[in-house]
Image: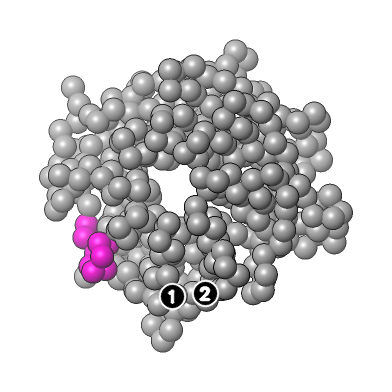
Amino acid sequence: MPDPMSEGPGFTAVGLRPLSGGEGTGAYCVNDAGVIVGESGSRPVTWDRDGSPTPLPILDGCSGGRAVSVNAAGVITGSLHAGDHLRPVCWLPDGRVRALELPGGAVSGTACRVNARGSILGNAMWPDYRWRTLRWEPGGETVELAALPGDGETQGQDLNALDEVVGSARNGSGVRTAVRWTSSGKISTLPPPRRATACGITDSGAILGDGVVWNADGGTVLLTGGPEFAAGQVVRITGRGVAIGWGLTPGRHGVGARWDGDGRPTVLRPLPSDAASTCFDIDEAGTVVGESVSQGTVRPVRWDADATPVPLPSPRGITATVAQHINASGTVIIGYGFAADGSAYRGIAWRRS
């Protein structure tokens, strides 16, 4: 029987059950159709609306893995365990698993994002622990993205619907800097202010780095905290150019923040009885999800357009702690908590009522 769903203001909550026994579960992505992907124990799975899991097939010779991204068409990507290494894969909408080929000499690899057209972003590792960024075409062809002069390491972080990729690269001196790759795989460094990495790119070409947005027209927007907080890490940017992250107040408490397209910050305060907040994801309407923290207590929370924090409910048998992702339409939030006996993490889905 499915876990009864708990009612909360605007959302209902359901626990994402394991495939067997007391395994932990983790949800890592949800698309606008409500398809949730993740892992149960060490096996890749999807969950239905009632929180029932379905295992995803694995390749011969692999022992398990996780699914981490799903697009609107239902293409899923992730990685499988192959001995001491990882093997990037995708699952097609008809349920088949397909290996994503690695370049010659690479011994391990991961796949981290799939975009609307089915292109997949990943990274491959060579025996000397040097990582390089890859992109796989919808048909499975491997595209090895360029490195900076000196053949240094690269790490891809995000790709948009046009197959443009952002991340970081090391030059011949070992200095890491934020970079962008075109759809053809050509690399370029991002202009000042210099940052070590870029973590997000929109379909219009706006790029998010720590404390800055580089716009496609060549302009930059600085993300500062003004008098209320010192800006720290940024994590997401929407298609409208709204960014989220967090920083520290003068009293040394963490606080979430949302910046509009002009860089004006809105503080995302914790719940009234709590001391700190952190945010992790944002939908296209500006709803943000994250956590509200007091001494010894962490609670999942959402902030709507007016930035008022609203707690999210716990499913029966689970103490909810963190809301980590929200789909673009804002209809489903995913996160995790702890089983009642405290023995395992459990994934949670919140669906808009």
Work out which quarter of the rendered image holds the C terminus and state it: top left
Residue 305 belongs to the span the image colors magenta: yes
Q: Earlier in the sequence, mark 1 or mark 2?
A: 2
Which residue, given by chain and number where applicable, does mark 1 sit on? 262
Q: Position of residue 95 (x, y in %)?
A: 44, 18
Q: Position of residue 209 (x, y in %)?
A: 57, 64
What residue is rendered at 41% in x and 31% in y? 73
Is residue 74 something that shows in the picture?
yes
Query: Hey, which residue is sitting farthest top in the picture?
Result: 60
Q: Which residues are magenta?
A: 303-311
Q: Is residue 22 above or below residue 350?
A: above
- Return the residue nearer the eye: 271 or 305: 305
Residue at 41%, 29% in the rendered image: 74
Asked if disc 1 and disc 2 are in contact, CB closer than 8 Å, the reply is: yes
Q: Position of residue 276 (x, y in %)?
A: 35, 68
**On screen, residue 21 above or below 196:** above
Q: Could you tell me which residue is drawn at 52 percent across and 19 percent down?
A: 97
Give SS at disc 2. Answer: strand
Query: In the rendered image, which residue does mark 2 sit on?
Result: 221
Q: Amino acid at mark 1?
A: Asp
**Three-letter code for the amino acid on which mark 2 is drawn:** Val
Q: Is residue 252 visible?
A: no
User: Residue 210 occupies which quadrant of the picture?
Assistant: bottom right
